[in-house]
Image (cartoon, rainbow, N blue to C red):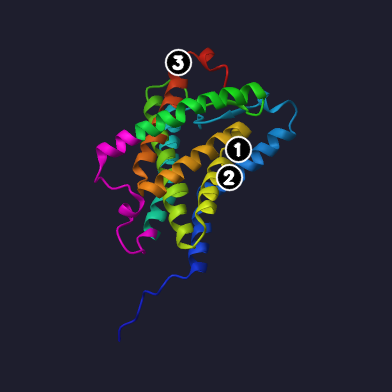
Amino acid sequence: MTVELTRPVSRRTLGTETLLVLGLSLGQSAVYAMVSIIAKLTAEGPLSKQTASLNTSHSARPYLDLTYQLLGICFALLPVLLAVHLLARDPGDPARTLGVDLRRPGSDLARGAGLAALIGLPGLALFWAAAQLGVNATLVPAALPALWWAVPVLILAAVQNAVLEEVIVVGYLVTRLRQLRWRLGAVIAASALLRGSYHLYQGFGAFVGNAVMGVIFSLFYLRTRRVAPLIVAHTLLDVVAFVGYSLLPKEWFSWL
């Protein structure tokens, strides 16, 4: 006797799956970021006098710190593998569905660099304006000790952030919400608001800037069906922010 192991996936199942994937990844980060911004707003002193630190040290022992950093990067990518695994149930190759295959490496790199320039320069202006208005916390993009492995780890962290966010928040979420028959505007808004919400711990300027970035990236994906250029763009932005802050004089970043 043959047992049928496959059956059509219902909208309810897809909705539950989407919530679980987000709950294990950036949806969880969004909840923590909301708690963080409430904590900052209710603490003594204005938001602009408080600090939001990224890429912090986890141990005073250098090689133990390095181990923690690498483990954190690896485990942070597990939700991406889960999302790809779940998309593999759909017809077609999930790598092609997401647009992360290697069919167009030159085009992906070029468009990614263009997107990084499009987002990066106005983004700096927005961060400066947010700092002047006092609606952002003081941002410390990199707080690792000055050790030989700091820059490589910061680059890996940039790649991890890019892969996690673009695959989950754009490729996976947009695909699932379209399968759930959400309207196009609602899909774009959901992806953009999620992106903005998990940056709330940095302040309201970061929320707005990342939400705008989310709109642009979602529209790009809906038009091209390729996440790879988004990963390239996000990686470039984070490498410049993390490594630049780590290597350049700190007084250059006093406006953050």
What residue did someone put label 1 on?
A: 200
For the residues bearing labels 1 and 3, Cβ distance under 8 angstroms: no
240 relative to 102, above or below: above
Circle 2 packing at 10 Å, graded few (<14), some (14-19), many (20+), is many
For the residues marked 1 and 2, what is the alpha-carbon distance in whole angstroms?
Answer: 8 Å
The disc, 1 or 2, on the residue closer to the chain's N-terminal end is 2
Whole-number angstrom distance, CA of label 3 to CA of label 2: 30 Å
Give the image location of residue 104, x and y in percent. Answer: 25, 43
SS assignment at label 1:
helix
Camera-nearest residue between 159 and 149 = 159
Which of disc 3 and disc 1 is earlier in sequence? 1
| Residue 165 % position (x, y) | 45, 43
Which stretch did the figure color magenta? 87-111
Q: Which mark is residue 30?
A: 2
**At label 1, which amino acid type do we have?**
Leu
Task: Give the number of the disc on residue 141.
Answer: none
Does residue 146 lie above or below 98 as drawn?
Answer: above
**Residue 120 is one of the magenta-drawn residues:** no
Image position, residue 41 (x, y; %): 71, 34
Residue behind mark 3: 248
How many numbered tags mark residues here? Answer: 3
Which quadrant of the figure has residue 75?
A: top left
Q: Are marks 1 and 2 in contact (CB under 8 Å)?
A: yes
Q: Residue at x 36, y 75 (%)?
A: 5
Q: Earlier in the sequence, mark 3 or mark 2?
A: 2
Quarter containing the N terminus: bottom left
